[in-house]
């Protein structure tokens, strides 16, 4: 039995086959956890000695709208975590879908992995996923007055407003976007016979 198969077996044994699904692709395991078991699963993954996922490598938001050319059925938003067990030298990816597309909410895992704090703020800012129980859930990358969540697939590419500093008013002002849409495909023009016979 390979190390990956052994880890998959241990995950299913510790978490219950009826409660989670585990898939393998490109030498990595992905564990899909229902929202109601998300926090409980995080504690088991950290505290069970055979798993011991003590390090959160990354947490990001995902928008599955139009995923697989519209073939995705189910909730739109998910949090995806990448975990590392230093002691056991294995990794796993966790995916947890938010049950409500209109107000995507999941519990925070900052009590399990404190490093999740900044990552959850980023997922909130860019995707609008609310992490219930987070001590300081506010925007981290966009401006405080920013409206919307720019990594959502239905967010307009050019945006609607821009901000700039106005030296006459001595403050930041918001105004409609002034950038003209343009073609961004580079044109390459070469002389006839370029590269032939050289």
Image (cartoon, helix red, strand yellow):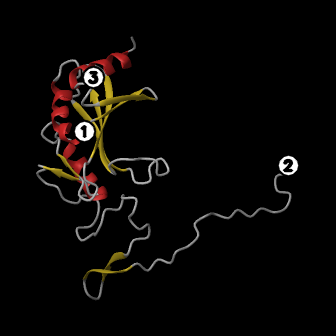
Front residue of 64 and 179: 64
Q: Earlier in the sequence, mark 3 or mark 2?
A: 3
Could you give the CA–CA distance between mark 3 and mark 2, rounded to whole angstroms? 63 Å
Between marks 2 and 1 in the image, the one whose residue lies nearer the viewer: 1
Q: Which residue is mark 1?
A: 34
Quarter in which the N terminus is drawn: top left
- Place residue 141 in its image quadrant: bottom left
Badge 3: few (under 14), some or many (20 or more) residues near its Cα, within 10 Å? some
On residue 158, which mark appears?
A: none
Residue at horizontal 15%, vertical 31%?
A: 43
**Circle 2 SS class:** loop
Could you give the CA–CA distance between mark 3 and mark 1, rounded to whole angstroms? 14 Å
Q: Is residue 74 above or below residue 44?
A: below
Check if mark 3's residue and mark 1's residue have beta carbons within 8 Å.
no
The picture places residue 70, in percent across and down from the top left corner, at 46, 52
Q: Residue furthest bottom?
A: 168
On residue 12, which mark appears?
A: 3
Residue at horizontal 16%, vertical 40%?
A: 114
Residue at horizontal 15%, vertical 34%?
A: 40
Q: Which residue is mark 2?
A: 198
- Residue 52 in view of the camera: no
- Residue 40 in view of the camera: yes
Could you give the CA–CA distance between mark 2 and mark 1, rounded to whole angstroms? 63 Å
Front residue of 133 and 184: 133
**Circle 3 SS class:** helix
Residue at horizontal 39%, vertical 63%?
A: 154
The picture places residue 11, in percent across and down from the top left corner, at 27, 23
Check if mark 2's residue and mark 1's residue have beta carbons within 8 Å.
no
**Circle 1 SS class:** loop
Q: Earlier in the sequence, mark 3 or mark 1?
A: 3
């Amino acid at each position: 039995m390979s190390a990956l198969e052994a880890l998959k077996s241990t995950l299913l044994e510790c978490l219950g086959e009826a409660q989670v699904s585990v898939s393998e692709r490109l030498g990595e395991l992905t564990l899909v956890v229902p929202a109601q078991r998300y926090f409980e699963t995080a504690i088991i993954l950290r505290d069970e000695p055979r798993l011991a996922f003590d390090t959160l490598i990354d947490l990001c938001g995902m928008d599955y709208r139009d995923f697989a050319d519209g073939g995705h059925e189910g909730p739109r938003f998910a949090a995806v975590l990448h975990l590392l067990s230093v002691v056991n030298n294995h990794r796993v990816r966790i995916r947890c879908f938010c049950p409500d597309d209109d107000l995507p909410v999941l519990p925070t895992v900052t009590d399990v992995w404190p490093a999740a704090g900044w990552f959850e703020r980023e997922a909130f800012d860019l995707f609008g996923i609310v992490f219930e129980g987070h001590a300081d859930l506010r925007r981290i990358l966009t401006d405080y007055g920013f409206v919307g969540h720019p990594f959502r697939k239905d967010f307009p590419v050019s945006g609607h407003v821009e901000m700039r500093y106005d030296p006459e008013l001595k403050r930041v002002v918001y105004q409609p976007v002034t950038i003209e849409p343009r073609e961004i495909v580079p044109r390459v023009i070469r002389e006839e016979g370029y590269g032939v016979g050289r």
